[in-house]
């Protein structure tokens, strides 16, 4: 989870050799290039705005004071636990495969809505309520969701968080899950159970993209800070949390082995 701020924070240190208000700021690399500002520094650390050459300029100083980052989109990614997951993951995998083999209604739903893959979303979507194994997974996920909600600065006084949905996704090669969001939920996420090499990453779309009127493309679409898409690699034993309004997708994997994950929604009451 990263939240950068375009300003100097407490403990900010300027490089030696420049007056304190100007250190860390430089001129454009070409005479015709505007004094573009770039975020520099470690993720989560105090950052400075710089351009690309060697001398400080009043324009760069103006950028430092004038530009700030607002309305952050926070995505949480972490291991479910540091240890003790082997037994839980084995039992989850057994139950996921058993569910697919016995879920006739779910397979019929997938034939119409999820070609090539299997999900229990259309048939058994409250696995945390029907399986002790999934209930244990929900208990562990809940710790992370509470931390995430604190980071979102939501007022949860007198309100209770609860998992409302939990379902299985099994995606072989060519199975895709196109851009979507999770209506009427607060926090959504995915726990990765099996991620063979070549598994597709989790993709998030910039929530402002449908409002980019008369806006030229960015110089480097692959750059996470300014590009329209952010990718989170699928990693077994890890979970990803996000606000449910954030559009996301899973493209086709490059491997024939199945990518297996467990998705969920949280609401409040």
Image (tube, helix red, strand yellow):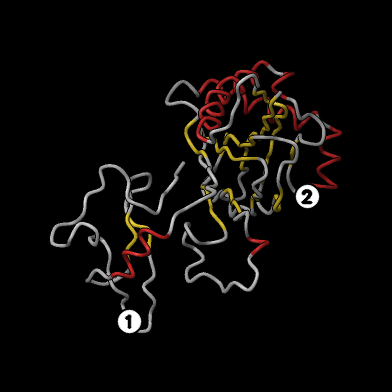
How far from the left and from the top, in percent, is residue 149? 56, 31
Residue visible at 66% across and 62% down in the picture: 211
In the visual, does 2 lie left or right of 152?
A: left
Q: How far apart are marks 2 and 1 (CA)?
A: 52 Å
| Label 1 packing within 10 angstroms: few (<14), some (14-19), many (20+) | few
Circle nearer the N terminus (2, 1) = 1
Position of residue 17 in the picture relative to residue 159 (left or right): left
| Quadrant showing the C terminus | top right
Q: What element carries label 1?
A: loop
Q: Mark 2 or mark 1: which is in front?
A: 1
Pointer 2 residue: 115
Badge 2 element: loop
Res. 105 in view:
yes
Question: Residue at point 59% right, 40% down?
Answer: 242
Position of residue 40 in the picture relative to residue 225 (left or right): left
Which one is in front, 103 or 123?
Answer: 123
**Vertical comparison of 67 with 2: above or below:** below
Q: Name the residue under label 1.
A: 30
**In which image quadrant can residue 257 be found?**
top right
Residue 5 position within the rendered picture, expressed as x and y whole percent measured from the top left: 41, 50
Q: Position of residue 109 (x, y in %)?
A: 84, 41
Within 10 Å of disc 2 (Cα), the crowding (few <14, some 14-19, many 20+) is some
């Amino acid at each position: 989870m990263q939240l950068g701020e375009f300003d100097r924070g407490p403990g900010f240190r300027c490089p030696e050799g420049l007056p304190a208000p100007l250190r860390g700021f430089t001129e454009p690399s070409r005479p015709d290039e505007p004094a573009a500002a770039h975020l520099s520094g470690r993720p989560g650390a105090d950052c400075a705005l710089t351009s690309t050459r060697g001398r400080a300029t009043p324009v760069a100083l103006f950028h430092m004071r004038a530009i700030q980052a607002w309305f952050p989109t926070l995505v949480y990614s972490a291991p479910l636990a540091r240890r003790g997951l082997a037994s839980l993951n084995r039992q989850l995998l057994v139950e996921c495969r058993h569910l697919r083999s016995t879920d006739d209604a779910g397979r019929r739903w997938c034939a119409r809505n999820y070609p090539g893959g299997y999900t229990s979303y259309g048939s058994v979507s409250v696995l945390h309520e029907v399986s002790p194994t999934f209930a244990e997974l929900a208990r562990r996920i809940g710790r992370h969701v509470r931390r995430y909600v604190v980071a979102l600065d939501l007022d949860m006084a007198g309100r209770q968080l609860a998992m409302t949905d939990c379902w299985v996704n099994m995606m072989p090669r060519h199975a895709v899950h196109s851009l979507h969001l999770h209506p009427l939920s607060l926090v959504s996420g995915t726990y990765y159970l099996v991620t063979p090499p070549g598994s597709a990453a989790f993709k998030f779309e910039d929530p402002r993209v449908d409002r980019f009127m008369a806006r030229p493309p960015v110089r480097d679409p692959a750059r996470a800070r300014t590009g329209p898409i952010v990718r989170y690699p699928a990693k077994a034993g890890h979970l990803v949390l996000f606000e449910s309004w954030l559009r996301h997708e899973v493209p086709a994997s490059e491997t024939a082995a199945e990518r297996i994950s467990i998705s969920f929604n949280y609401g409040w009451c």
